Amino acid sequence: MNLNASTVFAQGRFMTYDDARVGLLTHGLNYGTGCFEGIRGYWNQDERELNLLLLREHFERLHTSAKILLMKIPHTVDELVELTLELCARNRFEQDVYIRPLCYKSAEDVGVRLMGVPDAFTITALPYTPYYDASAGLKTCVSSWRRVDDTMAPARAKITGAYVNSALAKSEAQMNGFDEAIMLSNDGHVAEGSAANMFIVRNGTLFTPDPTQNVLEGITRRAVLTLAENELRIPVVERMIDRSELYAADEIFFTGTAAGITFVTAVDHRQVGDGRMGPVARRLRELYESAVNGRAPKYRGWLTPVYANRRVPA
Ligand code: PMP
């Protein structure tokens, strides 16, 4: 796909990506004062339909992120859903897609602050390319970079500038020969990966850090908790996790919109289980894959179809 010619939503209307430009002094670019979402759409070839996953949940989180940053998204959740469906239809996607709504401080002036700075809102959509090779699992390390604390830059909001934290951790991990970083919170408990939440399984119980542990309130995390509670009937506990519990775990996996459910083979040179995908991760992956691909009637409500009842503009 030619990104420059693709249709985006910016300045309150649809235009080409090439026409939507930002100036050098843009506040959000200089100070990281913005918030965003990452949403996935799954192409269903049999139904010739593009299904967007948990769309409302993403826009509700965007509204929360914006509120934390003293920003106002100029559209309700319902309007955002409609705009996104229209954007996908205008791009005539017939493949998996990744959608990136972004709200940023748009003033072109100098001075760090949040109040009284105008905002801009955009949505870009592009074909999805896989984030990890999920089949092989990931070799991880505990990062020397700690996760940003709620008292510094709230991790529960998806704040553009805070991704420097993720980028430092991920780069260090990869430059040291690992696939992914696990960040601890400032007080030394397990937080999350660079762009994914974490789960461990130990003695038949599923654990994940609770949302006060400086983690993004992940939408895939919530979906996986729902699947585990409804379908697996194993104990699910949200609580602080120690670093050494990573070494003792039977299974570890990441969850995220881009990451899906991706298992971890090792942490800090300690193999997790037998180094292969464990039974809980495997079962959750199967359930998640059938839900996102529209094969699970019970979870069909997670999907919003683009083309049903929508005429593609000529
Ligand atoms: N944590 C961070 C830091 C992330 O960037 C992401 C990706 N959005 C996640 C967790 C996973 O969140 P979600 O399931 O909502 O994509």
Image: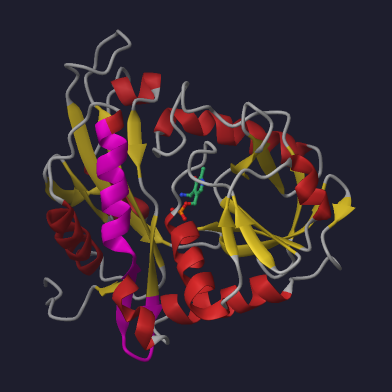
From this viewpoint, is residue 178 visible?
no
Relative placement, left or right, of 224 versus 123 is right
Left or right of 86 on screen, residue 133: right
Pick the quarter of the image with the C terminus.
Answer: bottom left
Res 232 → quadrant = bottom right
Residue 47 image-quadrant placement: bottom left
* Relative image position of residue 291 (x, y in whole percent): 43, 78
Is residue 23 shown left or right of residue 135? left
What residue is drawn where x is 31% and y is 85%?
48
Q: Give how far across and how far down residue 36 sits, in percent.
A: 35, 42
Q: Residue furthest top?
A: 111
Camera-side residue of 207 and 198? 207
Q: Compared to 147, does 195 lie above or below? A: below
Which residue is more in the foreground, 181 or 131? 181
Please give left or right for residue 177 compared with residue 280 in the image: right
Magenta span has 62?
A: yes
Q: Write the residue at 63% across / 31% down.
A: 168
Q: Is residue 67 above or below residue 227?
A: above
Residue 51 falls within the magenta-colored stretch: yes
Quadrant in the picture for residue 252:
bottom right
Look at 31% across and 73% down and name the residue there: 303
The magenta region covers 43-67
Q: Quadrant of the N terminus?
A: bottom left
How has the structure been colored for display?
secondary structure
Which residue is more in the foreground, 209 or 82?
A: 209
Q: Residue at x 58, y 74 (%)?
A: 284
- Is there any visible trace of residue 240 in the rendered image? yes
View extreme (bottom): residue: 46
x and y, in percent, of residue 133 in the image: 66, 64
Q: Is residue 276 above or below residue 34?
A: below
